[in-house]
Amino acid sequence: MLNITDTNKFGKVIGGALAKVEQTVTDAKTKARWINAIAKAAVEIEENGVFMTWMDEDQSLLIWSQKSNHIYSANGVCQCRAFEQNAPCFHRAAARLVRLYIEAENTPVKTHTQEVLDVPYLKNNAYTKAERVGGIRIN
Ligand SMILES: [Zn+2]
């Protein structure tokens, strides 16, 4: 089963996916279909995540559809009717959302402020004003 623990992070992933469709899909009908697929995927993951399993080996999402009693294995491809017709489906959208979410979870969050505080030579020093660094004039 899927376990989305960080809903903030997942929300950002969904927002990013919608933005990407907005920026990259030019055909209005296809765009609307992908936006629907992403929205449905978000709802399905939240409500039916228990029927989904992320497969790390081939980066795919297994989705058991209770409606059709089929199991779909989605990454870039899918086995559903929509995919056969070359149309966006929520299975693929869900697989992408889950992959991006897992990637985001595995990337430590670093804020700009923390980075600056960790690097001593970037700290403001009220007492000295560096004019030269290793013989190079910097101001
Ligand atoms: Zn599908």
Image (spheres, helix red, strand yellow):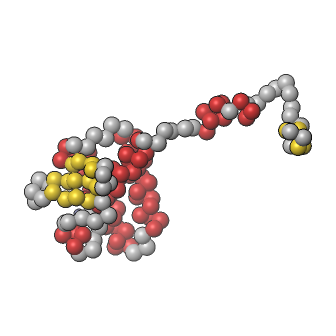
Left or right: 126 in relation to 15: right
- Picture coordinates of residue 123, whole percent (x, y): 73, 31
Left or right: 68 in relation to 125: left
Q: Is residue 54 above or below residue 34?
A: above
- Of the 4 image quadrants, the one containing the N terminus is top left
Q: Is residue 29 above or below residue 125?
A: below
- Of the 4 image quadrants, the one containing the C terminus is top right
Left or right: 76 in relation to 85: right
Residue most extreme to the front? 57
Tell me the residue at 38%/73% (across/down).
Answer: 28
Tell me the residue at 23%/51% (across/down).
Answer: 44
Question: Dividing the image into four equal quarters, which quarter contains ligand 1?
Answer: bottom left
Exactly how many numbered labels are in the figure? 0
Q: Is residue 36 visible?
A: no
- Picture coordinates of residue 92, whole percent (x, y): 29, 60
Closest to the observer, 95 or 59: 59
- Picture coordinates of residue 120, whole percent (x, y): 71, 30
Q: Is residue 32 above or below residue 125?
A: below
Closest to the observer, 95 or 9: 95
Tell me the residue at 9%/57% (across/down).
Answer: 69
Tell me the residue at 44%/61% (across/down).
Answer: 20
Residue 18 sits in quarter: bottom left
Q: Is residue 84 visible?
A: yes
- Picture coordinates of residue 117, whole percent (x, y): 65, 30
